[in-house]
Amino acid sequence: MNVLWLQAGGCGGCSMSLLCADTPDFHAHLRAAGIELLWHPSLSLASGSEVLELLQRCADGRQPLDALCIEGSLLRGPNGTGRFHVLAGTGVPMIDWVRRLAARARHVVAVGSCAAWGGVTAAGDNPTDACGLQYEDERPGGLLGAEFRSASGLPVINIAGCPTHPSWVLDTLAALAADELTAADLDTLARPRFYADQLVHHGCTRNEYYEFKASAEKPSDLGCLMEHMGCKGTQVHADCNIRLWNGEGSCTRGGYACIACTEPGFQEPGHAFDQTPKFAGIPIGLPTDMPKAWFIALASLSKSATPKRVRDNAVADHLVQKPALRRTRTK
Amino acid sequence: MSRLIVGPFNRVEGDLEVTLDCADGVVRAAHVNAPMYRGFEQILQGKLAHDALVLVPRICGICSVSQSVAGARALADLARVVPPPNGQHAINLMLATENLADHLTHFYAFFMPDFCRPVYADQPWHSEAQRRFLPGHGEQTRVALAARQRAFTLLGTLGGKWPHTQAIEPGGSTRAIDAAERVRLRAKLREWRAFLEQHLFADTLERVNAIDRLDALWRWHAQQPEAGDLRFFLTLARATGLAGLGAGPGRCLSYGTYPQPDGTLALPAGVWQMQPGGAQVLPLQTDCISEDASRSWLESGRAGEPVARHPWSGLTRPAPDKADAYTWNKAPRWAGQVVETGALARQLVAGQPLLSEAVAQHGCTVLTRVLARALELAQVLPQMEQWLRAIRPGEPFCIPAPLPESGQGMGLTEAARGSLGHWVVLQQGRIANYQIVAPTSWNFSPRDAAGVPGALEQALVGAPVRPGEDTPVAVQHIVRSFDPCMVCTVH
Ligand code: SF4
Ligand code: SF4
């Protein structure tokens, strides 16, 4: 499967993240999965006119294009002209290139939350009129329109994340190369379900603190980040605490909140990123699938049952109380 | 005179287009265009101050830690706090990991592949260059990418993830390191050191750091010209004349970086300039910094107002139809002058003897820029080993840093590719102005109000253009010798 990768209005971070894929030989990994890069802005020799020629051949259909990967949001401004991003050397706005190429591609893949929903580039009052390939935040549409289907019949595949995890990308591309990714493998926002059917909360090292509502109060505390520090891990679709980042990392393991970077509109949460919005002392964004009354009842019960160890460690940056030593055999 | 428009320029970060006026086989004038605008300085207006720490790393995926550090330092300046020693060491380790990994990526994946190009097919070293550095296949590039991946696992532990960690706070770092983690991080630094000593230098870092003269460098090269990728680079540099290619403006800026608990910087700040009687280092005066938007697709302000503005009063409002403008980048100047920034600038300001002599002889050129980055790898990795050793598990990594309602703060740091500064003005808890001056904004700046070209625009003048070349290879060497990051430039 050949892949053409272009960078639109983003930071290049999804490509840089991709190169952190957990493999001793990145290029051999791609080849083994049957993935061939026709061109990638950071990884290819071809420059200038050689690239223009390739793009032209893809756009005319003379060069078959299996997967078009777009990283970064699509900048439609000013006034719909796309001039905020003109593809260097072409005088043609990137949005026009993307429209032309998407019409030819067997699969179209949005790499990262910018390309999926507009992402951080669409924050504030969105000065560049940025959008995603097929979404604008959670509204279907975007650059290509809600009805768009690539030649394979699939919608734009949204490998959302800011940045996106290297193995979300590699697994998706490998599955496409093996013809193993169907519409049923995508969630309602067209994200691959193998990572989007999980919650960030799953596998979080702070789960014991969560159970007892023993909460962190300041950056670097060990407690649960949900009650005060803005963490959305109980609502956010991603497997960050199961499939770790850069060896043994994740946002919550790094000591800061999950800001929902895989979800549409994460860039404008409507509250301070590092603070949990509350109503009458109760967090507004309650865990997915949990009725509010139960949450309140359980939280007050568990708070009253919190062991001293958990309560003390929650507001320290290292373990100040060790678990008690107990006999583990019954006789 | 003929005109060449070169782009898309790949193996740089982001989108770049260069317009070249050529005559008699050389470039006579260059105009550098950053053809994308994202508007971070507009996006940040009106935001809560602390929210900037989520947004600013996302300016750039290759130097996101640098952006975080600059942002956190600007807020720390507002809050008048200094992180505790553990926090400083952890942040320095994160920043150094990113900067050094960047040097690796640049050397192996961005710069060296140009020697694999067909124009060099008749050179005796061409097949060896391909064996080592051909994109996707080169043996050394592949080993280097694996080393880079391993290096970033330091960031997994220290900062949760890379890029776009949120572990860097005005008061320190959010991830306390325990004793066992310190042991594991040390093993990772050893692994990184082993890669450098086996593959890049084919020698110990200590012996590389001891090379203090140009003749000693060439003797080191002559001992084993095939051993290690840096020696092979020196072979190619000599064969292709990189020592004389791409001379910059002869004035270099560094904000200095890696603050230590005793208040010093591991790499000092200053402005280095070439003088008739020898080089001179002036103290850094940040009030001498200005940005001029006369040739940018941005408003320059009302008539009668100064064209060059200090970042405290900087203005970012798109003006896409502005006549005579040719880029989204502004033109930063220091005391009205064009400066170059990057690893070479840092080393010259620090008075590194080998590079000082090399620059005295050849100037700031492709050779000395690439050499400076390689030597910085040898120099900073041992310092990382020391910072890690200095971490005291159990002591604080982060202190509270309540922000005032109003005020202004400046955050300076060094990214791999040079000096990065954030200037934030706060009013009633909200951001009233946020200005970012990125390294490549300095290096790839357009002409200013006086018509003076930016550093790369100057460095390209005189570059050879071979018959039939539409993307001249010499131009590619020069552009990539700056390790540009266009997404930062235009933010
Ligand atoms: S999604 Fe995030 S990491 Fe990816 S390009 Fe956009 S800002 Fe960068
Ligand atoms: S933990 Fe949340 S914010 Fe962090 S990478 Fe995962 S989804 Fe994004």
Image (spheres, coloured by chain):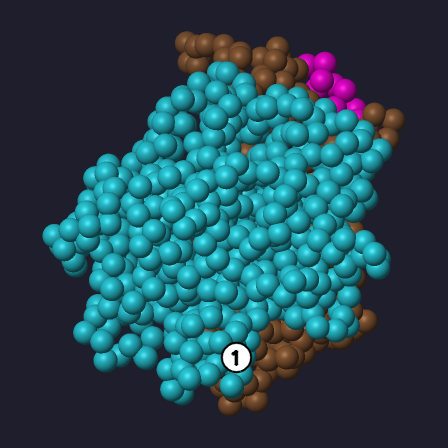
Q: Considering the numbered disc 1 on the image, is that residue within a helix, a strand or a loop?
A: strand
Chain A drawing hue = brown
- The relative height of residue B352 versus residue A30 in the rendered view (above or below) is above
* Label 1 Cα crowd, 10 Å radius (few <14 / some 14-19 / many 20+): some
For disc 1, the marked residue is B21
Q: What type of secondary structure mainly makes up the magenta span?
A: helix
Residue at x-position 38% and y-position 86%: B467
Percent coordinates x, y for residue A131 in the rendering: 73, 64
Q: In which quarter of the image is the N terminus of chain A?
A: bottom left
Q: Measuring 67% from the left and 53% from the top, which residue is drawn there?
A: B291
- On screen, A127 above or below A269? below
**A303 relative position to A205: left or right:** right
Q: Does the magenta stretch include residue A302?
A: yes
Q: In this view, does B474 lie above or below B185?
A: below
Q: Report x, y in % for residue A200.
A: 61, 42
What's the chain of the residue with tag 1? B
Kind of residue at badge 1: Asp
B340, B115: nearer the viewer: B340
Q: Which of B174 and B242 is in front in this view?
A: B242
| x 22%, y 56%: residue | B231
Q: Nearer the viewer, residue A5 or A189?
A: A5
- Residue B73 colored in magenta in the image: no
> Chain coloured cyan: which letter?
B
**Among all residues in the image, which is located at the extreme left?**
B223
Residue B163, position as x, y percentages in the image: 53, 47
Looking at the image, which residue is at 36% across and 44% down?
A: B376
Q: Can residue B148 be seen in this view?
A: no
Looking at the rendered image, the quarter that the C terminus of chain A falls into is top left
The magenta stretch spans which residues? A291-305
Asked if residue A49 shows in the view, the reply is yes
